[in-house]
Image (spheres, grey):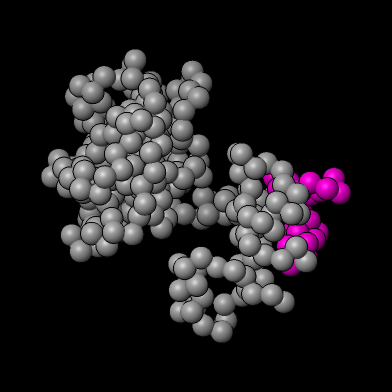
Amino acid sequence: MPRIRRSEPEERLAETAGPEFLEALARGLRIIQTFGQDRRQLSLSDIAKLVGLPRASVRRTLHTLIHLGFAETDGRMFRLTPRVLMLAGAYLSSNPVSTLIQPALERLSTDIGEACSAAVLDGDDMVMIAHASPARVLQLSGQIGMRLPAVSSSLGRILLASFDDERLDALLSRVRPKPLTAQTVTGKNELRRAILRARAEGYSLVDQEVELGFRSISVALQRLDGKALGSLNVGAHTERGSLDTMVDRFLPKLRALAGELRQQLI
């Protein structure tokens, strides 16, 4: 079977993984990841182009995913099925961090009337593992599984603040920040200053850098031994959460929750 055309990071992974690295499994996971909010259904040609694989290889992989129940087709377009949620569900139900955090975030969200989230670092991104919203529906970022650039989000910056200088500089030299809004900070020096400020202050406040009209404040989620596992945040629309409100009202409650959870995370 043809080898997967990999990006440089994927190529390095394959080289270090050794002979037991399964090309077929990697191919299937890559194809699953091509689908998303803006790509809810795709043709065979679309998928082959996105993953950089021959159509024949993609066709065999899709055939397998369909027979396993993870994908479906009308003969021309392909879509994922709800069975894919089993993969995320397996992580969420087996991870003590997410199972502890979800009810805690729901209590905090009810208390303050704003959206609350928790995320962990995955590569250069933060991935939401828990989320709670008040009764009113917010059409804002925050669904479980959503990815955000670590350098651009408060959830990410507070976690990057736990890196030592060498590790932080290595990350900043590697990433290529993109302007998500007109207010997104993309300069490497500015980002480093923002992360070091988060390190010194113990929190990160991001103002409309990920989504216009939306502010977020985050603190680190640590184990009892002090190791950072992820981060917690409160997000609010600018009309409801002024900068002072974020710091004076929401930050103390976030810190209190992080302290409560720390006692339970070993």
Q: Magenta stretch: residue 193 in it? A: no
Q: Is residue 249 visible?
A: no
Classify the position of the C terminus by image quarter: bottom left
- Number of disc labels: 0
Could you say which quadrant of the image residue 31 lies in?
bottom right
Q: Is residue 266 above or below residue 215?
A: below
Instruction: Residue 205 in the image: state x and y as whole percent.
Output: 25, 34
Instruction: Residue 262 in the image: state x and y as whole percent.
Output: 28, 48
| Of 198 and 15, the residue lying toward us | 15
Instruction: Residue 43 in the image: state x and y as whole percent.
Output: 75, 49
Q: Is residue 81 above or below residue 53?
A: above
Q: Residue furthest top?
A: 239
Classify the position of the N terminus by image quarter: bottom right
- In magenta, the rendered stretch is 57-82
Q: Is residue 98 above or below residue 180?
A: below
Q: Is residue 23 above or below residue 148?
A: below
Q: Residue furthest right?
A: 75
Q: Residue at x 13, y 45 (%)?
A: 200
Q: Residue at x 51, y 65 (%)?
A: 7
| Of 264 and 210, the residue lying toward us | 210
Q: Magenta stretch: residue 67 in it? A: yes
Q: Residue at x 62, y 70 (%)?
A: 4
